[in-house]
Amino acid sequence: MYDKNYVEQFTSYPNLIALLQKYSDFQKKTVDMRMSASEILYENTIRTNCYLLKSGYVQITDISKYGNTYLLMGAPGKIISLPIYYSELPQLIEIKALTDVIITRVDFEFLRKVLQLEDPHNYVTINYLSNLRKILYHEVTQNTTVVQIRIIKFLIYLADSLGMRAGNYMVWLPPFLTYEVLADFAHCSKPHAVTILKELREKGIIDTHRGQWAILDIRKLQALLDE
C-alpha cells in the first residue's frame, strides 16, 4: 500500500524537474513550450516525449478512426502524457490549451534513465496510472446518467480535482470553465447547460464573480445527487 500524499509530492512538477536537473543533459533533453488559449498541438503515436504541464490547463483527446475520445484534463504540475507501452499508445492525441499554458517537453529516454535511478519504486508511473483510472471512472459514470446529474458530477469533479477552496464549503472553479466547456465535458448542448446552471444559481448553490464560477456550498451541490 502506498502513501498517497508522499506519492503525489514525489511526482509533483517541482520535484520531477529537480530530479532531472541533477543530470548534465537536462538542458538538451527538455524544452518549455508555450501555447495560447484554444491553440492545439497534435502528437503522433511514435511518441518519444513526456509532457509535463508547468502552468495552465489543457484537454487531452484521443484522435482515432473510430472517433474522438476524451482522455483527461491536465492541471498545473501534472504529467499530461507519459508513454507506458508502445503498442497501447493512441494513434494520435490532441492537446488543446484551455488557457495560456507552458508545457515542459522531456525526452522520454532521458526521463526513463533518470527514473530508473531516482524512482526505483515507480511512483511516477503509479501516480500517472492512478489519475487515469479516476478519470476513466468519471467518464464512464458520465455516460450513464441524465444531463443534470452529468453536469453536477462534472462540477464536483472540477471542485475536487482543480478547484480552489475559499472557506469550509465554497470552492472557486478553474478559470477556463465556460458554458461551452461545460457542455462539451457533460456531453450536452450549450442551451441545456445554461438552463441547468441558471437553476443552480437560483438555488444559491453557484455564482460568478468577474467571469469566474464558484460553488458557494459544495454540500448543497453534492446533496442534489441524493435527490
Image (cartoon, rainbow, N blue to C red):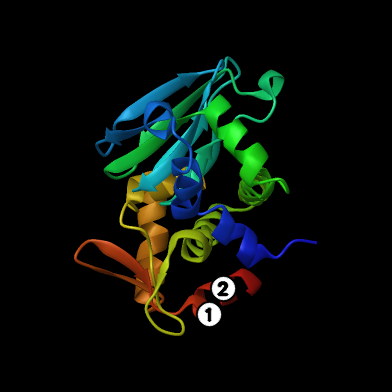
For this orientation, the residue located farthest to the front is: 24
Q: Is residue 201 above or below residue 123?
A: below
For this orientation, the residue located farthest to the right is: 1
Q: Is residue 82 above or below residue 123?
A: above
Residue, x 45% and y 27% (percent of image)? 94
State the mark number for residue 219: 1
Is there a contact, CB below 8 Å, between mark 1 and mark 2?
yes
Amino acid at the residue labelled 2: Gln
| Residue pointed to by mark 2 | 222
Is residue 109 shown left or right of residue 97?
Answer: right
Q: Position of residue 70 (x, y in %)?
A: 54, 36
Residue, x 70% and y 18% (percent of image)? 87
Tag 2, which secondary structure? Answer: helix
Q: Is residue 159 above or below residue 30?
A: below
The answer to which of 222 and 61 lies nearer the viewer is: 61
Q: Which corner quadrant holds the C terminus?
A: bottom right
Q: Is residue 179 above or below residue 161?
A: above
For this orientation, the residue located farthest to the left is: 210
